[in-house]
Image (cartoon, rainbow, N blue to C red):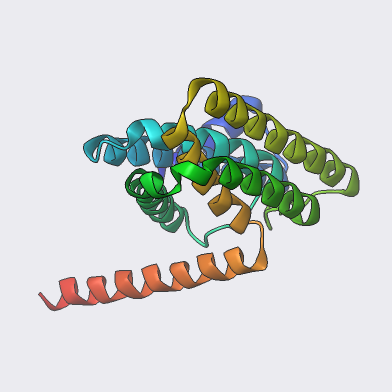
Amino acid sequence: MPLSQKLANYLVKHKGIEDRDQQEILAFGAEVLLGLFSGIFITLCLGYLLDLHILIFYMLLASFMIRKTAGGAHSAHPFNCLLITVASYNLLAYIARDTVIYVQHFLSYFLIGTFIIGIIVVYMKAPVESPQKPLNLEQRKVLRKLALLSVLLISGSQFITFFYFNKSLVNYAVSIGLLWQYLMLTSTGHRMIFFLDKLISIISRKGGETIEKD
């Protein structure tokens, strides 16, 4: 039995929850929570090996604020989500580290552009709800406001640390991570995750067939 299911069963028993819908919501929440923490841990561990962990930490922190308020594209399986998270953030951090030298002279415009894109996309698309957790109209209004506030807070922090403390690389990496997160709010981002899900499934299936033959 998966660890998330064990945790959900414990909470159901401890809280005395008998409603089937509530049990399913709790199980889904436990799975998401454990997937989140394991994803962060593994992403940072790989980042440490690649000497990218500092960048990835700030990228994940900013992305988490947007993700929790604005939502985003969901993978079909927690394992796929884990793989995509680990691969994407390490790749984006690597790209940021190796390309920052080429954008230093116009990085302020890049930060401003990221802020404008964030405001527009979040206002138009957020919140992107999970199929397992539909939102009512009032919840959508609150989450959209919180998402816009998150964009303002993150961008404000970026401008302060960039202009007063010259934190170019960190802010560049965070902006790239934010653009990835904003992409996940769009239909293009949803199609991308769907494609990656299919690709991972094909690779996993072929890998399983190879093991069976051996």
Q: Is residue 93 visible?
A: no
Q: Name, please, the residue furthest toward the front.
A: 105
Residue 111 lies, in percent from the top left, at 59, 42
Residue 148 position within the rendered picture, expressed as x and y whole percent measured from the top left? 76, 40
Considering only vertical position in the picture, is 79 above or below 194?
above
Left or right, residue 120 beside residue 13: right
Quarter placement of the C terminus: bottom left
Q: Quadrant of residue 185?
A: bottom right
Q: Please tell me which residue is depicted at 35% across the width and 75% down the height of the picture.
A: 202
Q: Residue furthest top?
A: 164
Q: Is residue 36 left or right of residue 18?
A: left
Q: Quadrant of residue 62?
A: top right
Point 36% across, 51% down: residue: 95
> Is residue 134 at all visible to an observer of this figure?
yes
Q: Is residue 11 left or right of residue 42?
A: right
- The residue depicted at 48 percent of the width and 26 percent of the height is 166
Q: How many numbered marks appear?
A: 0
**Residue 190 percent coordinates (x, y):** 60, 65
- Which is more toward the observer, 46 or 52? 52
Q: On screen, 13 above or below 210?
A: above
Q: Which residue is most to the right?
A: 138
Pick the front one: 73 or 103 = 103
Residue 92 in picture, x, y percent from top left: 41, 50
